């Protein structure tokens, strides 16, 4: 193994190679980059692989621990475990999705979408192309994590590690690529290990780059900058200086002193955010306070755990700088300028200096203490603004607010409490910028009116591709069990289902996941022809009882910037109709059953108003006969599904302007869809009817893989006339709408179809099942005012439905048809949905 590592210490697009082969491939790097960039890299591909690697790193029994072990930096077992935990935390889906949202605005930033739904202008974050990463030699995790930032922004990445480094970067990134079955990540990762003196390799590496990220001091940056071609973005992650600022109230506070000592000792001041100077809010002449504070800080340093053997090890240059700095400071004691306090074994030193000018520390637990009254803060520090990074402020709440403004104005890029200087958070800016934005370009496409119903330009260019789902099928009970195990921090928004197919179920969301889903549903509404610049909308979905209908569509319209009258579904139809007319509403959102009742009860007022043009409905379906009535009686020009979804999965499908009936496009950027046999857990043949199985992808708080939602449908072949590559499917009812009665399987939707085709029935229909003394009963309830004579209707059903006719002839079924007022039909209490099948059998 050792010989292989020594010979093949470069990783090139999935293969470990040696020096000779690496040199040959470097000469063809531009062609390799162009081939890799030919297909875009979806962020979900990166997230899925990183999350899989994160889980492996967290599992002590996983063999990855054994494989990476020889390549970890020297240190104690605790140090190595901490490093692996740090990598696992960074690579987790939660951390990376938060980073994407903070830095690039979403989890799919590369998709060309409309930032303003009222304009046909599309924007996205695109990769710059090739990012060359020049890693430092003193931070083991920086190299691989820099490449992962390049992957998140969609780039091809070539990384140079120091010849003195371990092989952690090569092998960690190889493990990452192995988690991606598509091979797309491997194609975008190249890791080379060579000394900076190898100028020709450095030149070949940087020549085709679109951005060069270099970690190190001024000399390192200058050495690389010479090889950066004109127009290439140079991203400097250089050495920075950080400091603490302590107000007078905190001069003697033991907690502050201990926290400062921890900041100094953590990482032996090797982090850019480690304090090198502690400033006191006092005049330079107050040497008594200066020296007293230095003594207390020295005692706090002495109380800290001793450095490890690795922390004590200094190379000759570091040792020379440390001893020179200390000796000069001791010499200046004779001039009354300084006072030096140091550990007998040389493991720490405090150098009090009455001159405020910022001075770099030789590190290794060496810290300056200087006076700097706040009135002089900007004047003193601003000349060093290029080098400033973190400022820790110790003081009152007012002091923190005032001093934060001052140190940021002086050039610092982050402010923390003392004791937390080296701590960070997911998505935090680095040195005042977001890394992912530095590795990206903001691009735009201006389109004409032909694209009014196109929410995402990418849908016209290519299908969204995700790794195939795996694992067992989940039913609603299994999903509810998963909900009970959701981390409380990921349960920020609670919804209950309407209960149309049983007991209401609880669904949990993070606000981030909810926001992602509302943006997706908003894009679907645009595809259905909604015009946020012109349509005036009454939101008439049901509200209350933790039901998400009204709230969700309020959120969708908010994201579209559409004009909204948030009325909600109410029992006073007259008042609702009057508001529709008064506020010139032309578009209605709501449940078909509610809208149908409203329109017919207030037909005279709404027809005389004459302003209604569009209906977008959800939760139920309008029949063809109902659509005809809406057009002919009320002048409705557009009737489309507002979305197809569920409370737990969110929006699943949307209709475009070319879709009708129950045909929907899949929200392919959120979910994958499988269609499995009704009786067996196997895929159906193309075009056959089966159970719809969804796997949600763009969700952090809850992972729903292979969820059998309870709906039936079939996939539609070919590309939609609207031009979108998003898959299409047709809804064909719910499993609960297939009734086992009198030994026969009867389908509710078939009754609906017969009522429309044979009877011209445009109202609602409900099936009620009962138990009798000798046989079961089935009553088809037809909405009064839209139904023919019950006897004629019964004969029509018997003539058109052979199974019902046979069950009646065999005296197995009592079959009746009756008129019912629409208000008397059974509905769910929460959502107002019509209960298609009411089973009253015991």
Image (tube, grey):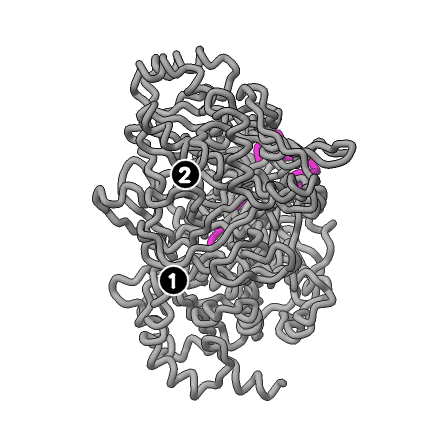
- Residue 778's spot in the image, x, y percent? 65, 34
Q: Residue furthest left?
A: 448
- Residue 150's spot in the image, x, y percent? 44, 61
| Foreground of the two, 708 or 595 | 595
Tell me where the magenta segment starts and ends, as one range: 240-258
Q: Judge whether residue 326 can be spotted in this image.
A: no
Q: Is residue 304 above or below residue 136?
A: above
**Mark 1–mark 2 distance (CA, rounded to whole Å):** 24 Å
Assign the N terminus to one quadrant of the image: bottom right
Instruction: Decide which of tag 1 and tag 2 comes sooner along the chain.
Output: 1
| Foreground of the two, 428 or 311 | 428
The residue singled out by tag 1 in the image is 40
Left or right of 468 in this view: 629: left
The residue singled out by tag 2 in the image is 522
Task: Say what secondary structure mark 1 lies in.
Answer: loop
Q: Is residue 250 magenta?
A: yes
Image point (29%, 30%), residue name: 533
């Amino acid at each position: 193994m050792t010989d292989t590592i020594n010979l093949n210490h470069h990783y090139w697009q999935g293969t470990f190679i040696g020096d000779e082969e690496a040199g040959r491939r470097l000469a063809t790097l531009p062609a390799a980059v162009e081939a890799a960039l030919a297909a875009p890299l979806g962020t979900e591909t990166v997230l899925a692989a990183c999350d899989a690697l994160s889980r492996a790193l967290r599992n002590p029994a996983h063999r990855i621990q054994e494989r990476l072990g020889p390549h970890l930096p020297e240190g104690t077992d605790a140090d190595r475990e901490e490093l692996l935990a740090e990598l696992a935390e960074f690579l987790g889906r939660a951390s990376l999705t938060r980073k994407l949202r903070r830095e690039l605005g979403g989890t799919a930033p590369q998709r060309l979408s409309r930032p303003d739904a009222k304009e046909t202008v599309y924007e996205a974050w695109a990769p710059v192309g090739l990012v060359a990463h020049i890693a430092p030699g003193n931070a083991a995790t920086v190299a691989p994590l820099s490449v992962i930032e390049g992957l998140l922004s969609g780039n091809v990445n070539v990384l140079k590690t120091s010849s003195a480094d371990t092989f952690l970067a090569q092998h960690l990134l190889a493990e990452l690529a192995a988690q991606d079955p598509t091979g797309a990540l491997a194609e975008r990762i190249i890791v080379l290990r060579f000394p900076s003196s190898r100028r020709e390799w450095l030149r070949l590496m940087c020549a085709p780059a679109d951005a060069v990220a270099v970690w190190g001091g001024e000399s390192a940056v200058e050495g690389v900058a010479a090889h950066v071609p004109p127009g290439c973005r140079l991203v400097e992650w250089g050495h920075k200086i950080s400091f603490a600022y302590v107000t007078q109230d905190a001069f003697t506070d033991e907690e502050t002193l201990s926290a400062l000592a921890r900041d100094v000792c953590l990482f032996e001041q090797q982090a850019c955010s480690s304090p090198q100077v502690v400033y006191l809010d006092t005049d330079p002449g107050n040497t008594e306070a200066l020296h007293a504070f230095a003594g207390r800080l020295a005692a706090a340093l002495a109380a800290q755990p001793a450095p490890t053997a690795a922390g004590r090890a200094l190379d000759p240059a570091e040792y020379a700088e440390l001893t020179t700095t200390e000796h000069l400071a001791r010499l200046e004691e004779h001039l009354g300028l300084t006072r030096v306090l140091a550990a007998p074994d040389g493991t720490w030193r405090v150098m009090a200096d009455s001159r405020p000018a910022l001075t770099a520390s030789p590190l290794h637990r060496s810290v300056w203490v200087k006076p700097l009254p706040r009135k002089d803060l900007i004047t003193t520090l601003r000349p060093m603004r290029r080098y400033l990074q973190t400022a820790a402020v110790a003081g009152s709440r007012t002091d923190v607010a005032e001093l934060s403004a001052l140190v940021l104005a002086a050039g610092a890029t982050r402010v923390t409490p003392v004791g937390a200087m080296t701590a960070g958070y997911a998505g935090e800016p680095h040195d005042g910028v977001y890394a992912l934005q530095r590795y990206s370009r903001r691009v735009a496409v201006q389109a004409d009116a032909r694209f009014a119903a196109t929410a995402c330009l990418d849908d016209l260019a290519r299908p969204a591709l995700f790794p195939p789902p795996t694992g067992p099928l989940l039913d609603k009970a299994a999903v509810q069990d998963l909900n009970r195990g959701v981390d409380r921090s990921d349960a920020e928004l609670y919804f209950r289902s309407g209960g149309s197919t049983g007991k209401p179920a609880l669904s949990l969301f993070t606000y981030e996941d909810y926001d992602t889903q509302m943006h997706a549903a908003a894009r679907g509404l645009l595809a259905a022809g909604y015009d946020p610049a012109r349509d005036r909308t009454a939101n008439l979905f049901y509200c209350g009882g933790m039901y998400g209908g009204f709230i969700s569509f309020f959120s969708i319209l908010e994201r579209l910037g559409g004009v909204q009258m948030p009325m909600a579904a109410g029992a006073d139809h007259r008042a609702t109709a009057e508001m529709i007319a008064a506020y010139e509403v032309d578009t209605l959102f709501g449940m078909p059953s509610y809208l149908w009742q409203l329109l017919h009860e207030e037909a005279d007022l709404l027809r005389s108003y004459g302003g209604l043009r569009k209906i977008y409905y959800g939760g139920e379906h309008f029949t063809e006969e109902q659509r005809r009535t809406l057009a002919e009686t009320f002048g409705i020009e557009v009737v489309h599904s507002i979305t197809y979804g569920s409370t737990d999965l969110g929006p699943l499908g949307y209709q475009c302007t070319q879709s009708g009936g129950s045909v929907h496009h899949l929200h392919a950027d959120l979910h994958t869809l499988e269609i499995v046999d009704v009786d067996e857990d196997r895929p159906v043949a193309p075009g056959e009817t089966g159970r719809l199985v969804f796997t949600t992808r763009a969700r952090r708080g809850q992972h729903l893989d292979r969820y059998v939602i309870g709906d039936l449908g079939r996939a539609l072949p070919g590309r939609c006339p609207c031009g979108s590559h998003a898959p299409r499917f047709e809804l064909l009812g719910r499993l609960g709408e297939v009734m086992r009665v009198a030994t026969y399987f009867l389908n509710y939707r078939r009754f609906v179809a017969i009522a429309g085709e044979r009877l011209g029935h445009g109202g609602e229909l409900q099936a009620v099942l009962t138990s009798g003394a000798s046989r079961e009963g089935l009553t088809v309830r037809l909405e009064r005012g839209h139904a023919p004579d019950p006897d004629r209707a019964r004969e029509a059903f018997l003539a058109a439905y052979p199974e019902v006719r046979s069950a009646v002839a065999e005296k197995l079924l009592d079959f009746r048809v009756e008129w019912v007022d629409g208000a008397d039909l059974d509905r769910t209490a929460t959502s107002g949905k019509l209960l298609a099948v009411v089973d009253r059998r015991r």
